[in-house]
Image (spheres, grey):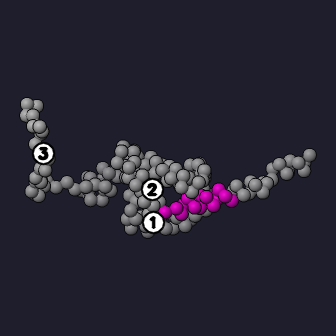
Amino acid sequence: MDGTNLSEQSLSPSDLNETNGEETALRSFFTFPFSSDEVYQQGLADLLAHGALSGKTDVERAETILRTQLFYFNRVAGQNLTIEDVRSHQNTVDSQNLTVTMDLSHPSSNSGDGETRLLTFAELTMLIEQGKTDDIPNNKVIPETLNDAPPSTSIALVRKKPWEVDSQF
């Protein structure tokens, strides 16, 4: 009986192939060129145009983008990865590279690598009180003056009144 329990608990060759296949698919997912894929970028632009990310926190935005990437990758590559597969792979990679990321995170925080840090309310208040509004991420300076450019000329046709009949006869 003990021999049967051991054989039931050990991985069969098909289980190993599934694990290797999933690992390969996950590696392919993380190396997929989403930023240069025109079809994915067009779909993402359509989602952004319809306000799919408006009003969401940074965490929710990252989650939505990860889900769009996963959906697109599964469709293009013919895979069936789930969000849980991706997260578990990220967690194992993050735990393995924890010391490396800790060493690299401090110098890169000042380099402005395109990723803005989410400030707390207390940090925002402190920056505003100190007059350092230029250090607030995504803070745009709005000029006090109106646009000095000349207005554009209208190219639309004048709309006809109901009593002005177009004589086409």
Q: Which residue is mark 1?
A: 106
Q: Tell me where the magenta segment starts and ends, as one range.
A: 20-33
Q: Is residue 145 visible?
A: no
Main SS, magenta region, reads helix
Q: Which residue is mark 3?
A: 157
Residues 114 and 12: in front is 12
| Disc on res. 40 | 2
Q: Quadrant of residue 143?
A: bottom left
Q: Which residue is farthest left? A: 164
Q: Amino acid at mark 1?
A: His
Residue drawn at x 48%, y 50% is 68
Q: Amino acid at mark 3?
A: Leu
Q: Secondary structure at mark 2?
A: helix
Q: Amino acid at mark 2?
A: Tyr
Residues 24 and 88: in front is 24
Residues packed near mark 3 inside 10 Å, few (<14), some (14 to 19) or many (20 plus):
few
Residues 22 and 59: in front is 22
Residue drawn at x 36%, y 45% is 50
Magenta-colored stretch includes residue 156 = no
Q: Secondary structure at mark 3?
A: loop
